[in-house]
Image (cartoon, helix red, strand yellow):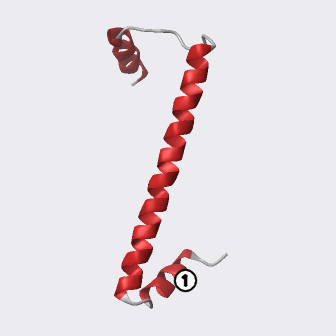
Amino acid sequence: MERFSDIVDAVNELPPDDQLTLAQILKQRLAARERSEIVKEVADARDKYQTNGLNSQSASSIMDEARDDS
């Protein structure tokens, strides 16, 4: 695999329009990856909830616990 600096140098040699297109593609791919991770986390949380792996709590008890952890 090429070094990061080599890739950056190669991108600098592209015409400005191609650089913008590459930036848009990378931004879209990163957003898609983040969405996929969120979907997986939600599915995992739902599975835990449905199998009673999660306990329901009031908002104040969650906040109290968060304050105790910090």
Nearer the observer, 54 or 70 = 54
Rendered location of residue 2, percent (x, y): 63, 78
Q: Horizontal placement of 37 versus 15: left or right? A: right
Q: Residue shown at 49%/53% (left/top)?
A: 32
Residue 43: quadrant of the picture: top right
Nearer the observer, 5 or 48 = 48
Secondary structure category for the residue under label 1: helix
Rendered location of residue 29, percent (x, y): 49, 60
Badge 1 local density, few (<14 within 10 Å), some, or many (20+)? few
Nearer the observer, 8 or 54 = 54
Q: Residue shown at 59%/77% (left/top)?
A: 3
Q: Quadrant of the C terminus?
A: top left
- Type of amino acid under label 1: Asp
Residue 58: quadrant of the picture: top left
Q: Residue shown at 40%/69% (left/top)?
A: 24
Q: Horizontal placement of 54 versus 64: left or right? A: right
Residue ID for mark 1: 6
Report the label total: 1
Q: Quadrant of the N terminus?
A: bottom right
